[in-house]
Image (cartoon, rainbow, N blue to C red):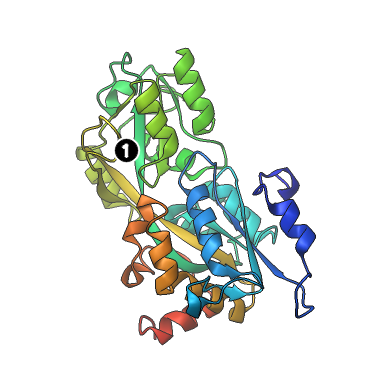
Amino acid sequence: MSLSRRSVLGSLGVVAGLAGLSTSGQAASFFRILTGAPSGTYYPVGTAIAGVIGAPEGGRPCRLGGGCGVEGLVALVQSSRGSVENVEAIESAEVESGFCQADIAHFAANGEGPFQGSPPFQKLRGICSLFDEALHLVVMPTSKIAAIRDLRGRKVAIGSPGSGTAITVHRVLDAFGLTASDVTLVEIDAVEALGRMRLGTLDGMFLIAGAPAEVVSEALSALDAQLVGIDGGAVDRLLKDSSFFTRATIEAGTYARAYASPTIAIRALWLVSADVPAELVHGITQAFWHPQSQAFLRNVHPRLIDLDLAHALDGMEVPLHPGAAEFYREQGFVQ
């Protein structure tokens, strides 16, 4: 999918019109972050990050409480179908950076999984690890689905074809002994899945996202949908066979009227193209971890409350970009 057909921030046209108009006479630098569907977690998180890594000319300086981003940088957020599309766009130089599940990053860099038969991606580099993403299974209250084994003979959405959710759900169902012949799997995004659940033509949906996810909140509040726990011996086997997953809990109170729900989680990574200059990536990484930036981000989305420099490299499945590596060396995290 070409970038011209992807959704871009509404202000993009205005920003583009201002390109190059600065007091110094130098053109602004643009840095794109490919995220996910607006209904998920990647998009709002990307929007927040874009707001702290750039510092267009004319703004209040960092020392006076203004932005602490890279001077002259304009960061743009773009939606996408998810992790698979994001790494493909970085590799093909359509965008500078994007978010991605750790397992998809590994598969792309090693020519495995959905990328088997293709050459390993060469341009994927890491900026940082962001947060844990939880696997949600949301079902209608009339479905009588209380566990994954109850999905046999049911129809569930597993995310868009370019999403990490679609790839991961197949592995999870396999661990539980379910195949595509046992469950009708529909590859649509969460918003469309919510609409079909409302019409009664879909029993539920899977979604990998940092909790809380807006679309899950809407399903639980508007449709009285329920979260189904993901636990048991099948999860033990899945964790044994894969280093990407960890046990997690969607805590009570994360969603209105929802009890604590056991599940699995995977790290969300922020990747960048190897072609982006080291000086720029160093500046972006430094701006992201600046105390003022972190204070802002922690107030924007619940998933960002857990941001911690000590966990900046957790689950990083590709080499760090030299610019990011230099920043972490300065902080004493890498040699």
Q: Badge 1 local density, few (<14 within 10 Å), some, or many (20+)?
A: some
Q: Is residue 294 above or below residue 104?
A: below
Q: Is residue 34 above or below residue 251?
A: below
Asked if residue 170 can be seen in this view, the reply is no
Residue 109: x and y in percent read 53, 61
Residue found 69% across the figure and 59% down from its top: 92
- Say which amino acid is labelled 1: Ala
| The one of 32 and 110 positioned closer to us in this rendering | 32
Residue 235 found in image quarter = top left
Residue 259: x and y in percent read 21, 33
Q: Is residue 52 left or right of residue 211?
A: right
Residue 207: x and y in percent read 42, 37
Residue found 25% across the figure and 34% down from its top: 229
Q: Is residue 77 above or below residue 288?
A: above
Residue 24: x and y in percent read 75, 80
Q: Is residue 280 left or right of residue 299?
A: right
Q: Which residue is mark 1?
A: 175
Asked if residue 299 can be seen in this view, the reply is yes
